[in-house]
Image: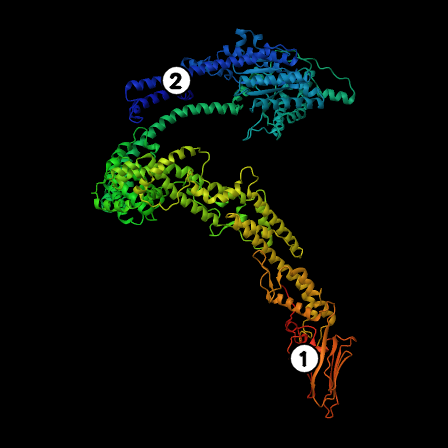
Amino acid sequence: MKKIFSLLFNPWLLLALGLLALSIVIWIVGPLVAIGDVRPLESPTSRWLLIGAILLVVALRKAWQFWRARQTNEKVVDQLIAPAKSASNDPADAELKTLGERFATALETLKRAKFDQGKSGLAGAWSGLSSRVGKRYLYELPWYVIIGAPGSGKTTALVNSGLKFPLAESMGEHAVRGVGGTRNCDWWFTDQAVLIDTAGRYTTQDSHKAADSKAWEGFLGLLKTARPRQPVNGVLVTVSVTDLLTRSAAERAQHAAAVRQRVQELHQQLGIRFPIYLLVTKCDLLSGFMETLGEVDKDTRATPWGMTFKLDREQHTDLAGFAPEFDALEKRLTDGLVDRLQLERDPQRRARIYGFPQQFEALRGLLKDYLEQVFSPSQFEAHPLLRGVYFVSGTQEGTPIDRMLGRIARTYRLERTVVPPNQSSGRSFFLGRLLSEVVFAESALAGTNLKWERRRGWFAVGAYAFIALFATVALIAWGTSYVNNQAYVAKVGGTVSEVRTLLQSTPNRASPDVMVLLPALEATRDLARAGIGDSVPVSYGFGLYQGRKLDSASQQAYRRMLIDAVLPRIALGIEERLKTGLDNPELQYEALKAYVMMYDPSRFDAAALKLYVLADWETNLPRSVTTEQRASLESHLDALLEEGQAVSPLPEDRALVAQVRSRLVSTPLTERIYRRLKRQGVGSDVPDFTIAKAAGPGAALVFTRASGQPLTKGVQGLFTFDGYHKGFQREVERVARQLADEEGWVLGVNDAGRQSTLRNVDVQQQLSDEVRRLYLTDYAATWEQFIGDVRMLPTANLAQAVQMSRVLSAPDNPLVPLLRAMSRETTLTDNRDVVAKAENTARDAVNRSREELLRLIGNRTQNASPLPPGAKIESLVDDRFVSLRNLVTGQGDKGPAPIDQTVGLIGEVYTQLSASDTAVKGGNVPPPSDVPNKVKAEAARLPEPVRSLLNTLSVSGTKATLDITRSNLGNALHAEVGDFCRQAISGRYPFDRNASRDVTTEDFARVFAPGGLFDAFFQKNLANFVNTTTKPWSFKAIDGASMGADTFTLAQFQNAAVIRDTFFRAGGNAPGLRLDFKPMEMDATITQFTLDIDGQVVKYAHGPLIPTSVQWPGPRGTGQVRVALQPVSTSGGLSGSVNEGPWALFKLFDRQLIEPAGAPERFKATFTVDGRKAIFVVSASSVRNPFRLPELQNFTCPGRL
């Protein structure tokens, strides 16, 4: 069975079967493969050529692989021999040189070896070929490495192992192996394995550590190079009984550590896991070994004596199994002891036989320690795979070691008995079947280099899988394609029926609505795509796709539908626009042009017709029509126009054409040209001019628009410098020439003379200029409106005004870039185009044809002002904005541009507002400044928008300053005047006539005296802002702004001023009045009237009418005013009155009758006491009557401004 499987999966057989299958596929399926309409494998010759080419490629591939294998073999051998060719004095290099020579010799030996012996026929031939082509000779036999300390019996064990060395006879024994004292390493070639006997110093590395270590690593590198997949199949570790019994514990530990290190290096360098066999050699040196076992038969001597450990699931060795296995060996010795003693007659030999189990027992502890030191697992190292421990003896030489007698002699200080040396018997013990039946039988336990094996395995699997996969995929693909195409054809057949039903349900062509056709058009065009979409799936190809044939038929039906259904509806739509577009002459013109060309094939222009139809659909299709549907309609229109001239199948309505023509001809040609330019979007690719873009990021901090439009919206691109030069200028002459040429066939103008005139170059130039005049007039008006719409942002407070002026006066202010951008856009004369001289020369000729042109096109521009001689037509715009241009460009070399001075003036505004801000923040009145007046004067001579911006900045700054100044003054008024005034004045006499408390004269003076609270506050804070010439007082208008209209507070200051002028005429700090009392008449019942004002007496006793002067307040300061009449009343009534306090005189007059006396400063006072009267004329020192002073009565302490 194994041979059958080996034959079935033979690579050469699989390759032959694959090539045969591929050839069959090419022969059968080749004629079905098509590339477009070409079938390259249809003829037998082409298929034979393809099959032959494939076979040739495979043969060349195999030949290249064979050549590459041989080259690789030679390269490996050269690399191994290379160290031998290099000269070096380094002992390690010399060691590597010797190793290389030995390795090269071993490889050459393997090359010449015949490992196919015993095989015959095809198997033998294949084995020999594959071993040489595929480098299998390196892996034909298992390889084992033997390591151990020097003298541990490695070579002796091999010599006496009983293995056969078939190459020794033909090639000489010493040519393939060494004997005794291995210096480097020897290769032992047996009929079952290759054994590599390494020098003991490689293991211990105790003589020349650096050289031995380098040689050992070089040896491992040679192994890995020669056998990269599986360098070794196992490792034999030898340890002699002598080393165990005679060495100290420290020496044994050192030896064990060295062996452990070599095992780990084997794992690390070779990259595989391998079984390890521990051979305890020189067991014959145990005392009693030969006496006990020397008489056993040959078969027993060949049987392994030791223990093989069991492996767990992870192939790990449990060293705990050593003790029971050792006990079993010891028990076997003990069980056979009686029989062996009975057979032995020599007493000394019987004594040694009897002691042999104890001698063997002495190895237990030593060997157990050795195993743990060498093979115990560690999580930081590879786990050694120890398969077993075996006791062997290769040759019986040397003196046995009696460990028991030695221990007794040392204990009791006895003379040690000398054990006689062994006599060589030429026999080996327990080696014969150990290597062949135990070690070699487990050669498969060794792992392989996973990376190398995986790469090689995947390559082989991939190659075979590719062939099988290709054949399978090809068959599946063709089968799938056949099934899919069958279903596809059936699907298309069903769709044809659906399309037919859909076409029958479509309304007739009497309607201009093309949307009703869209489903039918889509279905007809995509008939061949039913079920598969736009792209043909791969599963429908492989030469079997039927879509091209079906698509050809569906496209024919689609083209017929375009001509029979779509074209009439387009014509109807154009005709409808001619009837309904009365309010849009330009639309009617385009519709008329499209209508005429659909009935006159000589005038047909597919691009113009498409442009009109798309514009019409864009405007008139319902909003419910999606973008996808519009795109679909455009694709159908493109398909229709690709068919050639779209001649309408409907009869022409000549009456309608004549009616539309007569209406359009009445519009001047220049206006039609100008409207056409605007309608076709000239300049639409030029970005709009916006304040945000021109002024930069700071625009939003400064500017706004009076119309409320955002700063990101401005002048459309058509009315910009680039819009004029890159858009309008490039199109105006072409469009003018086009419409002039179209007049004949579109508008039906059959005036041959007119057509001839319009074809004149000078007339066409003048026609273009007239269109430019219309455009430039709109250009200038648009910019005037836009510039006048620019405003400065209103400021809500002084801080914002300061910020605004700071931004406008900064070096990177947005004003200057905006003005320069505006100047550029309103300066259309392109100095780069030096054509002035040629234009001036041609202008006379153009002017001569002007009158004739105006007659032809309609004299709509006859009222336009003519251009100055030599002026360009762009001056219609340039001259309108010359002041703006001069502002930003200056006068050549006469210094900086005026705009720089304007920015400097704004800087002064910023300084003035900053000073005002600082003052008002400190609670002070802003310092006076003439900057607002300078700004007003400067703004008056500047163009827009600077004029409005400066005025706004000045007014807003002043208003903000006044607002915050008023607020600060209100706070100061409240704190400095209002609080004390309310405490000293409010609710006191004489301000409250009914009050019981009087205002003290000191408080009265502090409040109202010159320099008092009211006067000082007014002079310090309000004098500059109040107009005292008006009645009542009012705030002054400063730069168009004022502090407001607070009449109440100003009225109190005005009242205070009157009180001050009335009571403090002398200018002192104390109130004072001078009064003249002149008697007028007195009742007869009164003999004498006496008025005592603080010691100042006024008397009258019906004598001469002599006036008496008094001062208020009086000199005594008593504040007493007394009235007395004589004679005293006898009826018990009052004969006088007394008033006290600083305002006693005022209280006296309050109770008397006061009447005017013909002059403002005089009044008549009637004193009445108990019905008796005395009348005096009182003259004050002021025209204001202090006793009936309205300002005194109306005064109220102010709060805030």
* Nearer to the camera, 346 or 890: 890
* Res 49 quadrant in image: top left
x and y, in percent, of residue 1199 in the image: 64, 66
The reply to whether residue 42 is visible in this rendering is yes
Q: Quadrant of the C terminus?
A: bottom right
Horizontal side, residue 338 vs residue 516: left or right: right
**What is the three-letter code of the residue carrying label 1?**
Asp
Q: How many marks?
A: 2
Nearest the eye: 310 or 109: 109
Circle 2: element type: helix
Task: Give the residue number, with chain letter if any, for mark 2.
Answer: 57
Residue at position x 64%, y 67% in the image: 1054
- Residue 350 appears anywhere in the view: no
Q: What secondary structure is found at the residue carrying circle 1?
A: helix
Query: Earlier along the polypeptide chain: callout 1 or callout 2?
Result: 2
Residue 256 pos. (x, y %): 66, 23
Q: Position of residue 162 (x, y in %)?
A: 56, 13
Residue closer to the observer: 725 or 79: 725
The furthest residue to the left = 651
Left or right: residue 469 versus residue 293 is left
Residue at image point 58% right, 28% down: 317
> Seen from this angle, which residue lies furthest front?
1104
Q: Disc 1 marks which residue?
A: 1150
